[in-house]
Image (tube, helix red, strand yellow):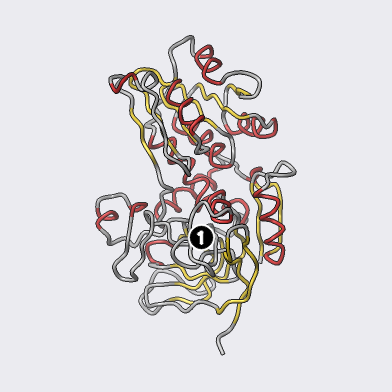
Amino acid sequence: MAAKMKAAVFVEKGRIVLEDKPIPDIGPQDALIRVTTTTICGTDVHILKGEYPVAKGLTVGHEPVGIIEKLGKGVSGFREGQRVIAGAITPSGWSHACLCGCGSQDGAGTRHGWKAIGGWKFGNTIDGCQAEYVCVPDAMANLAPVDDAVTDEQVLMCPDIMSTGFAGAETGGIRIGDTVAVFAQGPIGLCATAGAKLMGATTIVAVDTVPARLEMARRLGATDVVDFKKEDPVEAIMRLTDGRGVDVAIEALGTQATFEAALRVLRPGGVLSSLGVYSTDLRIPLDAFAAGLGDKSIRTSLCPGGKERMRRMLSVIASGRVDLGGLVTHRFKLDQIEEAYDLFANQRDGVLKVAITT
């Protein structure tokens, strides 16, 4: 009889529960990771609410920190017992998208018959990380060693939240001296704010309404904050920029209102960098888009993954230039995963991110 593990499993809309499942088998290019710490993402909540479809019985989660339990016979450069992370996006390294330099859009992999949206496989098309063990596909392309000098919580944001938020700043093409607005200061928006500072922006306007999030935004690099419940954010940002508008607006929530506001605060030729996961069609207002004649750009990003991306994220953490430790506000054991989902999905008690330990 196959050995069993505990895993958070999607059962039906509104229900993710802890169940016993077989410990995954691995192929020659894969690695079995004993998960030590993971977390819950907003995308997992979309799955919980039935807003993003996955197969019933799938183990959810896509942000693993852990220890190599077993290596496939074709994997070299790593050792069993080594501490590692893997990105939320696990590109194969050999697809057309990867070879074109866009590994996050790895797409459908013919070897395993995956039909992924981009390279997002964990908790989407294969079993994910909210479990005692996870199989990491194409391990040589996706595992990154973690130095013993840093804790699990210090690197927990690297697989997704940090990589995604930084991608918003990178895709926006922020330059030294730029003015940037970041709409929504949830975990991804906060990382986008930190990324904007690293990229060289000198004015960073953070938009939210939760005082603790606005304060965290200031700690991570925001020079100005706007409470959208107290004033119209478009008017406030245009006032702060003396009517010029921002060079880059980062949308980190995924709603029509924030997307439209981000478009309206752009200067002519500005860039809207979209990170939100949208659950309905978007509308582009004619005036805000200058009838298509404003030289404005709309860019989208999917969290970059792969071992080189993870190496870069780990390097930023090790350098001390960004401290994301404050994003973990609550801690649970895997046995408490259903309680953790209830807290996180309902955004109670000032939660930003939860750490789930096995």
In this view of the protein, which residue sits in the foreground, 258 or 222? 258
**Mark 1 closeness class: few <14, some 14–19, many ≥20 residues within 10 Å:** many
In this view of the protein, which residue sits in the foreground, 273 or 218? 273
Numbered-mark total: 1
Residue 157 position, x and y percent, is: 56, 49
Quarter holding residue 31 = bottom left
Residue at x 50%, y 68% (from the top left corner): 127
Amino acid at dot 1: Ile
- Side of 342 relative to 91 (left or right): right
> From the viewer's perspective, is residue 73 above or below residue 159?
below
Residue 176 position, x and y percent, is: 41, 25
- Side of 189 relative to 19 (left or right): left
> From the viewer's perspective, is residue 34 above or below residue 50?
below
Residue 282 position, x and y percent, is: 42, 35
Quarter holding residue 231 = top right
Element type at mark 1: strand
Residue at x 53%, y 11% (from the top left corner): 239
The quadrant the N terminus occupies is bottom right
Residue that numbered label 1 is attached to:
85
Residue 316 position, x and y percent, is: 50, 44
The quadrant the C terminus occupies is bottom right
Which residue is at the far right? 349
- Side of 299 relative to 181 (left or right): left
Which residue is at the far top? 242
